Image: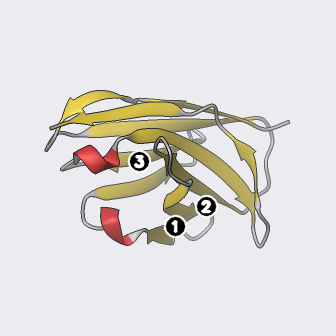
Amino acid sequence: QVQLVESGGGLVQAGGSLRLSCVIFGRTFSDYTMGWFRQAPGKERQTVATIRWSSGSTYYTDSVKGRFTISGDNAKNTVYLQMNSLKPEDTAVYYCARAQVGREYDVWGQGTQVTVSS
């Protein structure tokens, strides 16, 4: 059974930075995709960034390109989301999730709140 535990959220002023962490507990496959998602009140869940664990290839939604960086530490079984130049519109609950390659995301963390004040 795989579990994901996020941490690192909080309250920050616009222009500030936060680093989210997602620890992967349990056995998993040798190759999978990890993603960070966010959901603001009254809005649909949005894909923020993804990383293919074996190759390190990444994807970012347009609104975070140049500001956010997704990375993984294989030794620590942890995926990070470094968020710089935060904006009030980045305010949301952030979730990490895992997908087997070619499949839907099937394991989700509990979420961590990020609030950016103007």
Q: Viewed as shown, does residue 113 lie left or right of 44?
A: left
Ranked by sequence position, the earlier of labels 2 and 3 is 2
Kind of residue sitting beneath label 1: Gly
* Tag 1 near tag 2, CB within 8 Å: yes
Residue 105 sits above or below residue 78 on the image: below
Residue positioned 37% across, 34% down in the render: 114
| Residues packed near mark 3 inside 10 Å, few (<14), some (14 to 19) or many (20 plus) | many
Q: Which residue is mark 1?
A: 56
Q: Position of residue 79 (x, y in %)?
A: 52, 46
Q: Quadrant of residue 80?
A: top left
Mark 1–mark 3 distance (CA, rounded to whole Å): 14 Å
Element marked by disc 2 = loop
- Closer to the eye: label 1 or 3: 3
Q: Which residue is mark 2?
A: 53
Residue positioned 32% across, 62% down in the render: 64
Element marked by disc 1 = loop
Element marked by disc 3 = strand
